[in-house]
Image: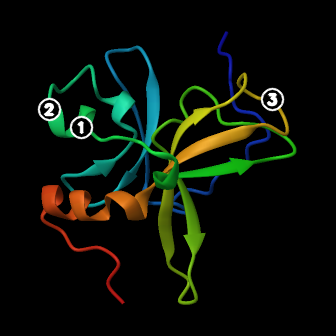
Amino acid sequence: ATTTKIFNGVDAVEGEVPWRGYFRVAMKASCGGTILNKNWVLTAAHCVDSLVKVTQISNLRVCLISSICTTSPTTTICEGDSGGSIDQKDDRGRYNAVGINSYALSDCGSSDKVDVMAKVAMYLGWIEKNTGETFCNT
């Protein structure tokens, strides 16, 4: 029998969020990610730290100013949500990743608790330098 840790989720229609990805590392932890292009997926550093020993990943310091805190009356992020993005729809109907799920300050599925996201804008220079891509074009 399969079990699920999805709380209050809504199934997406195929193709509805084509930038969203999911991966599993060595059949252990699973994470989400935002597909940047055919070579790059933006995810939480702790999702890949067992795969790559690149100091650029592990040396990214997370300070309060580089985080976004969110809360929901129904549930917090859970295992497997790490690395997924919180997106904002702009005036042109485009979705922009503004935060990357990092951790929750409570047990999985708790209500009225805080989730902490890495603020994408704080790392945009690093992302563009390492991917060779320019994002946030108007």
Q: Marks 3 and 2, how far apart in space?
A: 34 Å
| Left-right relation of 65 to 40 | right
Q: For the residues carrying marks 1 and 3, which lies nearer the camera in this image?
A: 1
From the top left corner, tell me how far across and down residue 107 is, in percent: 72, 22
| Placement of 72 over or under 52, stated as above or below | below
Q: Element at badge 2?
A: loop
What residue is shown with label 2? 54
| Left-right relation of 106 to 14 | right
What residue is shown with label 1? 57
- Give the camera-side residue of 80 and 56: 56
| Placement of 93 over or under 134, stated as above or below | below
Q: Residue at x 84, y 39 (%)?
A: 112
What residue is shown with label 3? 110
Q: Element at badge 1?
A: helix
* Mark 2 vs 1: CB contact within 8 A: yes
Q: Element at badge 3?
A: loop
Task: Say how many tags the image has.
Answer: 3
